[in-house]
Amino acid sequence: MNLKSAIKGRGAQLNVPNRFFELSHEMRDDFLEFCRKEGEISDKNKTLYLEVFPKTIVNKVESPDVGMTYSMNSYQGCEHGCIYCYARNSHEYWGYSAGLDFERRILVKKDAPKLLEAQLKKKSWKAHTIVMSGNTDCYQPAEKQFEITRQCLEVFLKYKHPVGIITKNALILRDLDLLTALAKDNLVGVNISITSLSEDTRRILEPRTATIKKRLETVKILSENGIPVNVMLAPIIPSINSHEILPLAKAASEHGALSIAHTIVRLNGAIGEIFKDWIYKTMPDRADKVLHQIESCHGGSLNDSRYKTRMRGEGKIAEQINNLVRLARRKYFSNKMMPKLNLDLHEAFKDGQLKLF
């Protein structure tokens, strides 16, 4: 690998043009030009936290193959820097690039707990599992400073409402007290993403995430405390981590996970260009092979937007991956299953509260 010229601690190695600005805006570089004239360095690779003020926080998920009905995102952008992340494209809607901006311009929604409480208090709201986060990691490094996710968990506990969590950060263990309390009423399920057992792979694929050892320890500690855990083997990338499916599933099961799930990587939107730039810099010896195998899973393209097939792919390589995951489930999870979360307690809680008025 040739990492000498790489931007340290980042996944993306460039900022790709924002497609919305390309169509309708004129980009200006006054600040960059000022820095050049003054001899200053405009880009010091620091992460900036920018507060934003949404009117709502709970989103209805319209995609039929995502596996969730409602989601909420306390942060937009993610410092973890996973090179394959499908959420990168969403940063363009905020006026930023899906590349380095996604990792270095983190939008923070400090009002998320209040907005969530307002949603759960509505008479018209019927309990559905709300997933944190459907877009970017709710336990990314920013959470250590802002504690928005923890405050939201307090709201879920207060209103006896079910919540799902998707993360790859061991910081979730900070909130073990709240998670344990929620689990006693079957109100929480956790999804831990583990894409490799190799630290070398993890460092370049997901540069600012928790180590594999810490993630497996997190699965174990959560499971030992009665908190149900599903391990996400996602995404599976041909010739990068596709050979690790069975070892990953075995490790997940041995550490207490109740199930596994997977997707096959697809490089939608700007992610294709970002990924190609990254792989030619980090894995030049196998870049062409990996890209061609990804294309073979999606009808000759790096991306597939068709529901149902986009997550699982098609063709021989995709079939091999999907068969390996089925074998892993039979071998390591035959007597395990994630429980369905309790939707009734919130309705009973609301009924009880309304009777007080």
Image: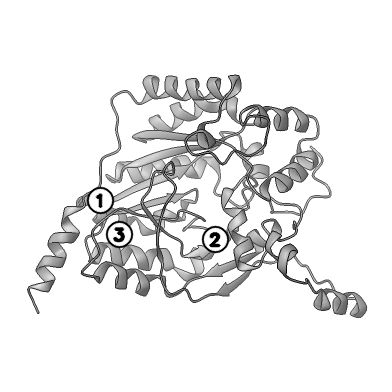
When the figure is inspected, residue 111 is found, relative to residue 64, above or below; the finding is below
Most foreground residue, 50 or 306: 306
When the figure is inspected, residue 247 is found, relative to residue 109, above or below; the finding is above
Give x and y (percent) for residue 343: 21, 52
The amino acid type found where label 2 is placed reads Pro
Give x and y (percent) for residue 147: 44, 68
Sequence-earlier tag: 2 or 1: 2
Mark linked to residue 317: none
Task: Name the quadrant of the N terminus.
Answer: top right
- Separation of disc 2 and disc 1 at Cα? 25 Å
Sequence-earlier tag: 1 or 3: 3
CA neighbours of label 2 inside 10 A, class few (<14), some (14 to 19), many (20+): some
Residue at x 7%, y 73% (from the top left corner): 355
Q: Is residue 253 visible?
A: yes
* Quarter where residue 201 is shown: top right
Q: Give the residue number, with chain letter if any, for mark 3.
A: 178
Mark linked to residue 141: 2
Residue at x 35%, y 75% (from the top left corner): 114
When the figure is inspected, residue 93 is found, relative to residue 196, above or below; the finding is below
Side of 131 relative to 310 (left or right): left
The amino acid type found where label 1 is placed reads Ala
Residue at x 55%, y 20% (from the top left corner): 320
- Separation of disc 1 and disc 3 at Cα? 9 Å
Q: Give the residue number, with chain letter if any, for mark 1.
A: 183
Sequence-earlier tag: 2 or 3: 2
Q: Is residue 45 visible?
A: no
The amino acid type found where label 3 is placed reads Leu
CA neighbours of label 3 inside 10 A, class few (<14), some (14 to 19), many (20+): some
* Secondary structure beneath label 1: helix
